[in-house]
Amino acid sequence: VQLVESGGGLVQPGGSLRLSCVASGSILSVNAMGWYRQAPGNQRDLVATITRGGTTEYASSVKGRFTISRDSAKNTVNLQMNSLKPEDTAVYYCNGDISIYPLNVRSSYWGQGTQVTVSS
């Protein structure tokens, strides 16, 4: 199973970015998906998650600014980030709770990360 992120980059404060992540491989089902971020010297923290049923959870620091969504048919998860702040600067990682063929083994998978830099 591979998770591949895209959409990171450099943006000015107040700007917007949209991150996308696609899961591929021997996937039987994709359960919860989410985004985490890690700034230099910090631990990896939850940004937002979304269940198969569409229930979402956000870190308090991004509520009202970020929106997570998914397309279950395409095994994708997106993160729309608005009103970005310098403190949002980090490497953003996609995570998927995925069951795989042939034995329906369920594990957590990570993407390679995409850099988001918010700076003027």
Image (cartoon, helix red, strand yellow):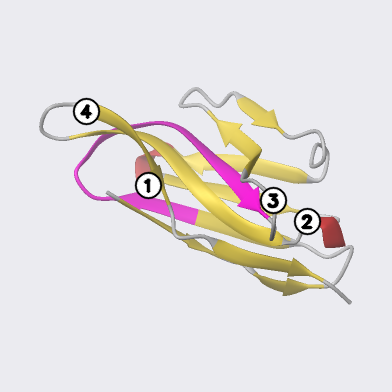
N-terminal label among 2 and 3: 3
N-terminal label among 4 and 2: 2
Question: Which residue type does callout 2 highlight?
Answer: Asp
**Image vertical order of residue 115 relative to residue 2, above or below:** below
Could you say whether the residue bearing mark 3 is in a helix, strand or loop? loop
Q: Give the x, y percent position of residue 64.
A: 83, 39
Instruction: Find residue 74 and name its label.
Output: 1
Residue positioned 58% across, 34% down in the render: 49
Q: Residues within 10 Å of mark 4 (few under 14, many from 20)?
A: few
Residue positioned 58% across, 44% down in the render: 35
- Foreground mark, 1 or 2, reads 2
Q: CA distance from mark 2 to mark 3?
A: 13 Å
Q: CA distance from mark 1 to mark 2?
A: 27 Å
Q: Is residue 60 visible?
A: yes
Q: CA distance from mark 1 to mark 3?
A: 32 Å
- Does residue 101 appear left or right of residue 72 in this picture? left
Q: CA distance from mark 4 to mark 3?
A: 31 Å
The residue range painted magenta reads 21-38
- What residue occupies the far left of the structure in this picture? 102
**Image vertical order of residue 115 relative to residue 63, above or below:** below
Instruction: Find residue 42 and name its label.
Output: 3
Could you say whether the residue bearing mark 4 is in a helix, strand or loop? strand
- Does residue 25 appear left or right of residue 93 in this picture? left
- Does residue 101 appear left or right of residue 18 in this picture? left
Instruction: Find residue 88 and name its label.
Output: 2
Q: Which residue lies under the disc numbered 4? A: 105
Question: Which residue type does callout 3 highlight?
Answer: Asn
